[in-house]
Image (cartoon, rainbow, N blue to C red):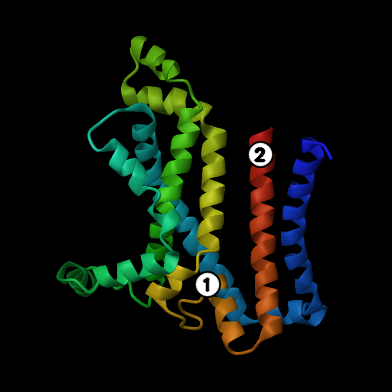
Amino acid sequence: MTFRRASIAVALLTFFIYAALIASLATFLSLDTVQSLFSSPRTLHAIKTSVFAATLVVFIAGLIALPAGFALSRHDFAGKRIIDTMLELPLFVSPAALGAMILIFFSTSTGIWIQENLQQFVFTIYGIILAQLVAVLGVAVRLCKAAFDEVPPRYDEIARSLGASSFTAFRTVVLPNARRGLFAAAILTWAKAMGEFGATITVAGTIAMRTETLPVSIYMRLASADIEGAVGAIALLIGVSLLVLYFSRFITSR
């Protein structure tokens, strides 16, 4: 067997591992289960909460990740390597640990003051948003940086030499050329926020019809031995995520 065939075989094996797991859902999935799932107010609330939180998180993360990613891509400054390394924190620290760190912060005097005088986060939808933001922000900055790295620095240097300010060069030259990578970054960040579980359940808890996202709904259904409901929620989450990711690949490949 040639190396080419061996590598293709390994790629197919990887695909079939995940395909087999998805196909196994059909064992417990029926038309009645799907109908009852979509007619359940609890499921509809979990969908709305997940979509709303993930969309808002992408917007907030974008406001931070765009300038931060551009700074890391274009400029050298003190502490750049430390910041660049810190962005990997959500990748090697478990989401549950990130959620625990958030809870510990809100147990400090500063965190207690924030919750008492500004906004309550623990066991609220704001906790869902905060937990998801902490879990995806580092990845969003990293993806934006990668998108800006694809644009040659001489483009914005030429724009500035022609009289454009740094912000004008960023807005009119860099952003349009990096738009596909940034769009893919937004989609991937949204998908990761939709599937976030560990930090969310640690900070916001498992309050039905209040802090119940789709991943939390899956956990709660499994905990109550509602296997069919959990399978339906899993299939829904996978379907939405794969559809969004496929759409992202389609747009960026054009």
Q: Residue 216: percent from the left, percent from the top?
A: 53, 75
At mark 2, the secondary structure is helix
Mark 1 packing: few (<14 Cα in 10 Å), some, or many (20+)? many
Residue 194: % across, % down: 54, 62
How crowded pointer 2 is (Cα within 10 Å; few <14, some 14-19, many 20+) is rated as few
Kind of residue sitting beneath label 2: Ile
The answer to which image quadrant residue 40 occupies is bottom right
Residue 213's tag is 1
Query: What residue is rendered at 77% in x and 80% in y?
Result: 28
Q: Is residue 27 left or right of residue 169?
A: right
Q: Is residue 102 above or below residue 243?
A: below
Determine which residue is flagged by label 2. Answer: 251
The alpha-carbon separation of the residues under discs 2 and 1 comes to 28 Å
Which secondary structure, mark 1?
A: loop
Residue visible at 39% across and 43% down in the picture? 65
Where is 176 relative to 28, above or below?
A: above
Among the 4 quarters of the image, the one containing residue 6: top right
User: Quick check: 17 above or below 99?
Assistant: above
The three-letter code of the residue at mark 1 reads Thr
Find out whether the residues at labels 2 and 1 contact each other: C-beta distance under 8 Å.
no
Q: Is residue 1 left or right of residue 38?
A: right
